[in-house]
Amino acid sequence: MKIALVGNQNSGKTTLFNLLTGTNQKIGNWPGVTIERKVGIIKDIGDELVDLPGIYSLSPYTVEEEVSRKYVLEEKPDMIINIVDATSIERSLYLTTQLMELNTKVIIALNMADRLEAKGIHIDTEKLSREIGTEVIKISALKADGIDELKNTIKKYDRRKVLSQEIFKSDIENEILKTKKRFGINRFMAIKILENDRMYQDYQEADIKNSRQRLEEIYRMDIEEIIANARYDYIVKIKERVATTKPVKEPMSDKLDKIFLNKFAAFPIFIVIMFLVYYLSVGVVGSFTVDWVAGIVNSFGEIVENFLNNAGASSWAVSLVVDGIIAGVGAVLGFVPQLIILFLCISLLETSGYMSRVTFLLDKLFKKFGLSGETLVPFIVGLRM
């Protein structure tokens, strides 16, 4: 059996692929493009697993989305494992609603749900399964939780469920149903024909164009926008029914974020922190290290000078070595401890997560000068240099 692994970018797809296949995988490029493809055999099952490029929908706006849609529609995998990021379920389920419109078995792997529960948010997988119309397995790809249950579901799952027809309003559903019957196609293709998708231009008959124009006049927006809005409305309703929230103690990191990333206090706090970093690296500790290195260099220079004089070297040679080479190298070495301390301080801020937050915070300001927030660190180091 051929199984496709489909999901958004950064949803844990690659981690899940590695857990399911182990080292039994092969890597190549998709025909005609340079996007990497990974194919492996699921351990203990023996089915082929194809890791598709991370996508957000089956409406192709990027090469990755084009590759993934082409594979799902043309290669027709026997099953799709749709990995869903529980921490951004509204965005992730958009792709799910499209996958469920294909005539393919779909299993949803709800990833990172443990992170939500730490915030007091619980997703009822049984309710979600009933709402969506397919199996939902809660996993943690990072912790390798739920993988055995997912494998067992793959082995036994042999139902072909389709998404409820309640996702759109009745007038849109009627047009979808008419298009399905007219061409003898699945629900996904019927919707794409109504959306005037470039892949289905051969189906653009006069009746289809009239139906699309009528819907656009009723809703006063483009047909793609009509469909997209309806999908998101459907997803919001599902989330309201399957997710429950209970109050939890606010973690210390969130409390600190409210202080350090406050829209009024964030920038002054950043200036104070940078002042302390420079004061530490250049001032208190930095000046001590400069004096310490200068003392070592001077002592070494005196030793070399005495040695050269005793050896009968000429005065210009002594001056070249002592005042030129040793003094010149010593002048540069004097800044090395300061730079080490500066980079150490920046590393500590980076490890704490503060630098990434400040980078995001200052991105808007830096863009006014044609830069991005990522230039913050070289900017800080450049000021010292």
Image (cartoon, helix red, strand yellow):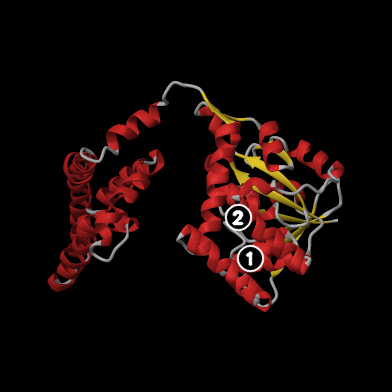
Left/right placement of residue 72 relative to residue 117 reads right
Image quarter where the N terminus lies is: bottom right
Is disc 1 placed on a helix, strand or loop?
helix
**153 versus 22 height, above or below:** above
Quarter of the rendering containing residue 32: bottom right
Is disc 2 placed on a helix, strand or loop?
helix
Label 2 neighbour load within 10 Å: few <14, some 14-19, many 20+:
few
Quarter of the rendering containing residue 283: top left
Q: Which mark is residue 171?
A: 2
Which three-letter amino acid code belongs to the residue tagged 1? Answer: Lys
Residue at horizontal 27 percent and vertical 37 percent from the top:
262
| Callout 2 touching callout 1 (CB < 8 Å) | no
Residue at horizontal 25 percent and vertical 54 percent from the top:
380
Compare marks 2 and 1 and give the one earlier in the sequence. 2
Residue at the spot of label 1: 192
Left/right placement of residue 86 relative to residue 332 reads right
For the residue pair 158 and 368, the one nearer the viewer reads as 158
**72 versus 112 height, above or below:** below
Which three-letter amino acid code belongs to the residue tagged 2? Answer: Asp
Residue at horizontal 15 percent and vertical 68 percent from the top:
319
